Image (spheres, rainbow, N blue to C red):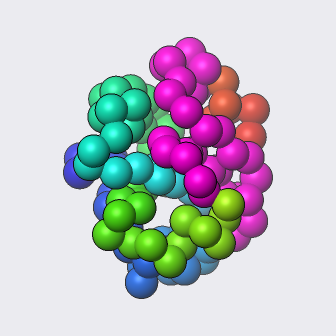
Amino acid sequence: MSTHIQAITDNTFENDVIESSLPVLVDFWAQWCGPCKALAPILEDIAPKYIDKVKFVKLDVDQNPSTPPKFGVRGIPTLILFKDGQVKATQVGLLNKADLTRFIDENI
């Protein structure tokens, strides 16, 4: 991962996402997923702009099978924005930079 995006697991999800004081954008992804790979550099590009506003994390769905079904993740990439421990918004599929920024801004 990068300095601005942290990898999380099923075991750390509660602490890293639900209990976070900041809104958290979770990227549900997998190594084999082409659109996930296309989304990664876009997330890397915008994450620094949200320091102290939004925490960015990634959860590999193949290595962490328990969490995705709890939030209805059936396709990837899926982005879920959590605020105060609750799901605030969900976006499925690849987004361009402008749409991703708009998604975050409208929901934080």
- Dividing the picture into quadrants, the one containing residue 85 is bottom right
Q: Position of residue 95 (x, y in %)?
A: 53, 24
In the image, 89: left or right of 34? Answer: right
Q: How many marks?
A: 0
Q: Which residue shows up at 50% across the image and 28% down it?
A: 94
Q: Which residue shows up at 60% across the image and 56% down it?
A: 73
Residue 90 on the magenta segment: yes
Q: Is residue 39 above or below residue 1?
A: above
Q: Position of residue 41 (x, y in %)?
A: 31, 29
Q: Is residue 53 visible?
A: no
Q: Which residue shows up at 34% across the image and 27% down it?
A: 38
Q: Position of residue 90 (x, y in %)?
A: 69, 45
- Dividing the picture into quadrants, the one containing residue 58 is bottom left
Span colored in magenta:
73-101
Q: Position of residue 56 (x, y in %)?
A: 45, 50
In the image, 12: left or right of 23? Answer: left
Residue 3 on the magenta segment: no
Q: Is residue 21 above or below residue 4?
A: below
Q: Which residue shows up at 66% across the image and 64% down it?
A: 71
Q: Is residue 62 above or below residue 54?
A: below
Residue furthest to the bottom in view is: 11
Q: Is residue 26 visible?
A: yes
Quadrant of image for the C terminus = top right
